[in-house]
Image (cartoon, helix red, strand yellow):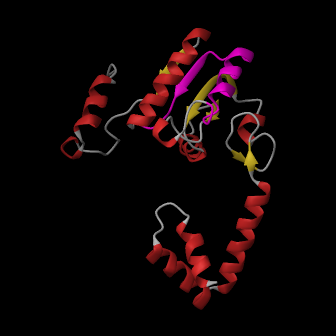
Amino acid sequence: MIETLNKAFCTLPGVGSKTAQRFVYHLLERNRDGGFELAKALVDAMEHVQHCNSCRTLSEKTLCNICANDVRDDTQLCVVETPADIHAIEQSGVYRGKYFVLSGYLSPIDGIGASELGLDELEQKLVERHIKEIILATNATVEGEVTAHYISNMAKQFEVQITRIAHGIPIGGELEYADINTIAHALSGRKNYT
């Protein structure tokens, strides 16, 4: 049983066997109530959390709170890689549109193509809705850039504005510690200073 629990914790990203072992022994030796609480929460989540029928984020309802909110701007659609990206953007308090979650990025080597990312659903949204702007908010990785380029090419036929989130030096960051790609993105994405 202990080995099975250890293997279960190893399924989490970034958790190796030593970390998993520490989790297991901590729960069994010091926090059995916490272990039961964790087990119940996991079972509840696995049974009740599904994908939103509109944006594909994780939700306990058919439509997530953002998609069900009539105040949100239906003409803006921000395309992100993961539900965690929505959480990060929402914390900024700036974006008031809706989302589309890819749940990954294009990676032919890993067998992840357009259909696995739901890009046919995204294209259908462009056909059915009055979307005026698609904001590409994929990560600044090779795969994220390829995915953004693919979506941009797909969306061009629908006469929508296609924008990309800016990448560059973070607030509080220092140039001497930034890598050359970050500096290049920051310079190419510069805007007027007023």
Image location of residue 122, percent across then percent down: 65, 26
35 w.r.t. 171: above or below: below
Question: In the image, which residues are magenta?
Answer: 115-139
Image location of residue 67, percent across then percent down: 74, 35
The one of 94 and 9 positioned closer to us in this rendering: 9
What residue is shown at x 46% (from left), y 39% (from top)? 109
156 w.r.t. 117: above or below: above
In which quadrant will I find the N terminus? bottom right
155 to the left or right of 178: right
Query: Across the whole image, how many numbered discs are drawn on residues?
Result: 0
Image location of residue 51, percent across then percent down: 73, 44
What residue is shown at x 59% (from left), y 41% (from top)? 103
In which quadrant will I find the C terminus? top left
The one of 89 and 25 positioned closer to us in this rendering: 25
What residue is shown at x 57% (from left), y 31% (from top)? 79
Please check the rendered image and state whether residue 66 is part of the magenta-colored stretch, yes or no.
Answer: no
Image location of residue 30, percent across then percent down: 59, 89
- The picture quadrant where one finds residue 26 is bottom right
Q: Is residue 107 visible?
A: no
- The picture quadrant where one finds residue 80 is top right
49 to the left or right of 118: right
Please check the rendered image and state whether residue 134 is part of the magenta-colored stretch, yes or no.
Answer: yes
